Amino acid sequence: MNTYLDWLESEAIHILREAAGQFERPVLLFSGGKDSITLVHLAAKAFYPGRIPFPLLHIDTGHNFKETLEFRDQLAARIGVQLIVRYVEDSIRQGKATEPQGKNASRNALQSITLLDAIEEFGFDACIGGARRDEEKARAKERIFSVRNAFGEWNPRCQRPELWSLYNGKIQPGENVRVFPISNWTELDVWHYIQREHIALPSLYFAHQRNVVMRNGVCMAAEPCLHIADDEVVLNKLVRFRTIGDVTCTAAFESHAATVEDILLELHDIRYSERGARLDDTTSEAAMEERKKAGYF
Amino acid sequence: MDLLRFITSGSVDDGKSTLIGRLLYDSHAVFEDQLQAMRKASRKAYLADGAPDLAILTDGLKAEREQGITIDVAYKYFATPKRKFIIADAPGHIQYTRNMVTGASNSDLAIILIDARHGVVEQTRRHACIAKLLSIPHLVVAVNKMDMVSYDEQVFYRIAAAFKSLMPEGSFQSVHFIPISALHGDNVVSSSERMPWYAEPSLLAYLEELPLKPRERQGPARMPVQWVIRPQSEDLHDYRGYAGRVIGGALHVGDAVQVWPSGLETCIKSIELGHQVLHEAHHGQSVTIQLTDQLDVSRGDLIASVAHPPVLSHRLRAQICWMDDHKMLRPGTKMLLQHQSRRLRCIVEQLVEKMDIYSLQAIPAECAGLNDIVTVDIRLASPLAFDPYCDSRHTGAFILLDEHTGQTLAGGMILHALD
């Protein structure tokens, strides 16, 4: 145990093995972002030379970047893990979700509906996710093993106390547990680990030329699924993404960082948080808490 | 760079949130947009002198912001070039003993805040007592609000002396006293010019430099088995890898070990992590080991060095902190006991005594409720391999679960085996 990165890695692997050991049907929630890619890397390490003993689940809003989807399929094929994809589009077609309207319309929040359906369809009792406590203030209070009731809801005031490294995944039928192995990692820790382990990432994270429109001071990718108003101008800029959700909810920013090393240098000086570039968290002070209560990742 | 986990505790209005806010703010762990969002949300976002109220950085839940209190343990992160820090921010109210015990269970150090105007109060004693109960090795007593007592050194030394008389010598590996003003930043990140009489490093400098030698690192080696890796592929037909995280001293290739509770002896054939082949595995390291003999080993078993075997017993005495709001603990209560990767049924035979939360004296107990700290005798459905908590904060700890709902009812620390 030489560095804090070794400690974080060992802790995450311990949690992943507890998830495999305590549950009948765990699943890893894969978004295509750096945190869930890091999770897959950790899971491969935790069970080597065996295979990862649970599938990956991706909830596709239908508005994902093509780079994310290509990367997802290649990764799953390379490590030989089962990939399940469920579509928000289907939930809308089935009348379970309503397509949001307007300029800033995003299917991001609808993912919860599709996710809860998938949990029921496959009978998943544990969903392993890449959320980190440093991301957002409601997440700072979330347990590593976090129980969701039969409606997928999180009740922040009745969380189980979590002591030592004893994770309690005993639940009643219908309930499920969200498992967060990299809870104690910060954004910088993830990047340092990506650098150390040479983890491959989608090209979106590195500086590239892209057509964008400027909105609230950030660059939104000018993709077909983004509503572009008549008075908005499409510009070509050198940008990168700091966090990847779908096209409608994540913004890029101007950057020259072309390598992981460049990104680490850039992050040391940056004065804005990772989620500051996400329109889904800036809608209200308690936006994340409300979405989490309703079953969000 | 290494890692220090610490807990902060203090009474309501001791300035605990302000201290954490100060550490985060001054170490640049807070981003501009987070500050802006919080300023927008909080009416009391600015203090009288126009500085941002750093306390608003720590309240995570809506109800907490509305009521201006901390309900739950929150984890906060910051790093300096020397160390990464994880803060467990536990609320100070008396009814939240549960939260302090939770935060303390994973901490290497506790910061206890004392308001310089009020000195050592009942809460101070309770917090120190919980820190000791959970065997936190290091203690920092921060005398806060020194600005309110004109930075008077006599006040500081009087409080330090009062605190020393409270805790018996040797309760902690180290106890350090430091006068601060979290509000103005005196002795928090940099040394204070307003307290030239205090020549020692600032709080942050102290946290950065404190040598960390967990007692467990010198202790006997153990590895609870979490998962058995059996690829059953053609080239790895007979491969059986035992996956787990090492606790205590190191395990080496060639070491003689026993597998508990069966007690069967074997040797370590290999240690790996991913593609890496290792010769030894240390405290805290997650690895996969192979044994030289084909034994029946499964999740829940404990691999331990032959030289220092664990205690094996189906009865034990333990101190527990009861954490459930609804259910009461009575003699005869049946529950599940989770110890490392093992879960087994148990029954509480008797409540020996409980700690009175006001006097901190042992009193007789017939039942126990939320936040009670009780000594109990427990009988297990089958023998358990463990170490006393004073020897290991890992193999000496357990939680008790409700058999039906799965709720975590209590956290426990093993004192010793019973016949």
Image (cartoon, rainbow, N blue to C red):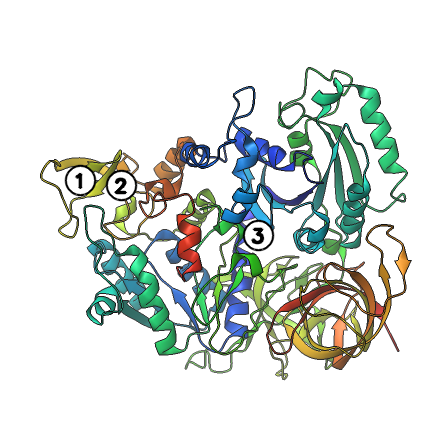
> Can you say whether B53 is above or below B225 in the image?
above
Residue at the image position 45 percent from the left and 46 percent from the top: A136
Using the image, name the chain to which the residue with label 1 belongs. A
Q: Reading the chain from its start, which is encountered first: label 3 or label 1?
A: 3
Residue at the image position 58 percent from the left and 71 percent from the top: B226
Mark 3 or mark 2: which is in front? Answer: 2
Which of the pair A78/B158 is nearer the observer? B158
Circles 1 and 2 in contact, beta carbons < 8 Å: yes
Q: Which residue bears the numbered disc 2?
A: A252
Mark 3 or mark 1: which is in front? Answer: 1
* Badge number at residue A212: 1
Residue A3 visible in this rendered orientation of the protein: no
Using the image, name the chain to which the residue with label 2 belongs. A
Mark 3: secondary structure: helix
* Badge number at residue A7: 3
Figure quadrant of residue B243:
bottom right
Image location (x, y in percent) of residue B235: 43, 79
Which of the pair B67/B333 is nearer the observer? B67
Q: Which amino acid does label 1 sit on?
A: Val
Which of the pair B325/A244 is nearer the observer? B325
Mark 2: secondary structure: strand
Q: Reading the chain from its start, which is encountered first: label 1 or label 2?
A: 1
